[in-house]
Every structure is written in structure tokens, then in C-alpha cells.
Image (tube, helix red, strand yellow):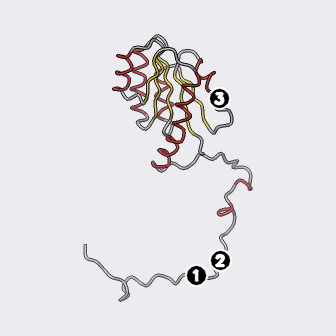
Amino acid sequence: MPELTVIIHERMAHWSRQLRPRFDGWPIRWIETRSSDDLSLAATRSNCPILVVGLDGKPDRGLRDLVEALRAAPDALSLMIDPSGGDERAGLARELGATHVLSGPVVAPEVERWVRRWLPIAEARSAALGWSPANRVDLDSDDSLDPEYAEDPPSDPHPSPPPPPRNSPDVRQEEC
């Protein structure tokens, strides 16, 4: 699995402290943001990120931040956490682009389930968009090179015949 990005946007580091240990050893790049600008920048620099946005007493600001983040990363999967639990606000968050909203008292295993569920989806979206896996390579070490590119390629014992010349009778020329 390539390294995937989870962006946690909240005033206090509550969800970050809860989630990081639960995904210890997973190829996840964790980004914590506190401001709207930092969230937008992190989303812009990420490929198919998973956003966890806590509303934490400032729901209007959190909803605006969600809109900006989704504008920067339209392929993001976004989880809004609204501890005050308003159905009206949950509906508005969905209309603004939230993939899912958790309202009321939320426990860490519930948030973990959503993130865990979305990791393969984010990976598939990333691959569908043509992003290659993010492999960490030590550029100073020769053994980090892919063997295919480390040496000159071996000669082929059964080379294919060269293509016929362009004006050969075997080549059909089409008029444009």
C-alpha cells in the first residue's frame, strides 16, 4: 500500500492523539492543521487525502474550512465530527461536500472505522488518477535502485525484427 495522507483539522489535538496510535505501522502521512490556510495548503499538496475535520464549537468556521479543503482536493474523503450533534448542520455539511458526518458524542473506534474503511478507497482513487506509490528511496545508496535500471539492460537473445520502412508496401498510409 502506498503512503496515504490523513489530514486532521481541529483546534485541539484530540483526534490526532486518538488516531495515530491506532494506525501505528501503517503507511500513513499524518498532517495536523489548525488554520484554514494550513488545511487548504495540506489538501493541495496531497493526493486523495482523507480529511478529519472537528467542528469543536466553531461550526461555521469548520464548514468554511471544509469547503476550501474540498476545493483544493476534490477527490478527498472527508469526515466531519460535530460534537454538538445538530441534524441541520449535518445535512448542510453533506450538501457542502462532506463524505460523512458524525454528530453527537463520538468515540475513537467509530472514527477509526471510517478512516480504516477509506484507506483502500483513497489508494484506488490515487491509482486511478495515475499517481504512483510513494516509495521512500535512499538516493545515496546504490542498492536502492531498481535492478531494472541499475545496470545496462542485457541484450535480447531473440530480438524482434526492425519495423518496415515507412514507404514500404507493407505499411498502409492513411490520408488525413
Disc 1 marks a residue whose amino acid type is Pro
Residue 43 position (above or below residue 173): above
The residue lying toward the viewer, choosing from 127 and 65, is 127
Tags 3 and 2 in contact by the CB under 8 Å rule?
Answer: no
Q: CA distance from mark 1 to mark 3?
A: 53 Å
Disc 2 marks a residue whose amino acid type is Ser
Question: Which residue position holds label 3?
Answer: 22
Residue 134 horizontal/vertical position (percent): 59, 45
Q: CA distance from mark 3 to mark 2?
A: 49 Å
The residue depicted at 33 percent of the width and 82 percent of the height is 172
Question: Which residue position holds label 2?
Answer: 155
Disc 3 marks a residue whose amino acid type is Arg
Residue 163 horizontal/vertical position (percent): 46, 81
The mark tally for this picture is: 3
Residue 19 position (above or below residue 83): below
Question: Which residue position holds label 1?
Answer: 159
The residue lying toward the viewer, choosing from 66 and 121, is 121
Numbered disc in front, either 3 or 2: 3
Specify the quadrant that holds the C terminus.
Answer: bottom left
Mark number displayed over residue 126: none
Residue 169, located in which quarter of the rendered image? bottom left
Numbered disc in front, either 1 or 3: 3
The residue depicted at 55 percent of the width and 30 percent of the height is 113
